Amino acid sequence: MGAVKTKRMPRAVREQQMLDAAVRTFGQRGYMAASMDEIAELAGVSKPLVYLYLNSKEDLFTACIRREAAALTAAVRAGVHPELAADRQLWDGLRAFFTHTAQNPDGWSVLHLQARTHGEPFASEVAAMRAEIVAFVTELILAAAREAHRDPDLPEREVAGLAEALVGAAESLAAWANATPGVTETEAAATLMNFAWSGLGNLMAGRPWTPPEAAAQTSG
C-alpha cells in the first residue's frame, strides 16, 4: 500500500520533499559531507528516484540555492509597503529579512555559507540573489532621499555603496543571530536599524560625516 501511495504522489510535491530534505542536509552537514543516500532517506524515497528527478548532487544543490534564494527575496519584498514612510519601509524590510533567515536557518546556511565556499556555479547563483536584494535596498535608500528632498545631492555611487554595506551587514548579523542563543529576529533587525538609520538620517539631513583630513583641508 505504501509503495502505491508513493507512486501516486504528484511529481511537484515529491520534488519539494526532496528539496526540503536536501536543504536540511546541506545546511547542517555541508555540501561536501552531505550524501545522496542520506538525502534520499530523509525524503523517504530511493536514491535512484532523487537522481531521476534532479540528475546529480550538483544539480540538486543548485536547485536548493535557487529555491531558498527566491523565498528569501520574496519574503523581503513582501514585507515592505511602499506607501509607508521611508524609515518604516527599511525597518519592515530588515525585519522580514531577519525573520526569514531565523525561521529558515538551514536555507540561510545553504545561501550564506555553503554556496559561497564551493565555487562555481553555486557562487554565481547566490551572487544573483544578492544583486537583487542590493537593488531593492538601493530603491529604499533612494525613497528615503526623495522623502528628505535631497535626491539630487546624493551621488549614485554613494547610494550603491550604502546598499552594499547594509546588505553585507545584514548577512553577517543574520549568521551571528542564528548562532547566538536568545537573539530574536526583532532584536537583530533593531540592532541594524539603529546602526544604519542614524547614519542615513544625518546624511539625508545634509550632515554627512567628514574624514578628519578633509575637514582640516576645508577649514584651512
Image (spheres, grey):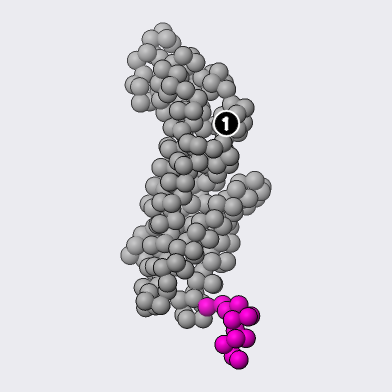
Q: Is residue 130 above or below residue 119?
A: below
Residue 97 visible to the viewer: yes
- Coordinates of residue 124 in the picture (x, y in percent): 46, 42
Is the magenta region chiefly helix, strand or loop?
helix
> Bounds of the magenta span?
208-220
Q: Quadrant of the C terminus?
A: bottom right
Residue at horizontal 60 percent and vertical 77 percent from the top: 211
- Coordinates of residue 45 in the picture (x, y in percent): 47, 16
Mark 1: few, some, or many residues within 10 Å (few <14, many ≥20)? many
Residue 19 within the segment the image draws in magenta = no
User: In terms of secondary structure, where does tag 1 sit?
Assistant: loop
User: Which of the pair 68/157 is nearer the observer?
Assistant: 157
Residue at horizontal 57 percent and vertical 31 percent from the top: 31
What amino acid does circle 1 point to? Tyr
The reply, left or right, for residue 19 in relation to residue 180 is: left
Residue at horizontal 59 percent and vertical 26 percent from the top: 34
Q: Is residue 86 above or below residue 2?
A: below
Residue at horizontal 37 percent and vertical 68 percent from the top: 143
- Coordinates of residue 194 in the picture (x, y in percent): 56, 67
Residue 88 visible to the viewer: no
* Residue placed furthest toward the top: 1
Q: Is residue 154 above or below residue 63?
A: below
Q: Quadrant of the N terminus?
A: top left
Q: Which residue is disc 1 drawn over?
A: 31
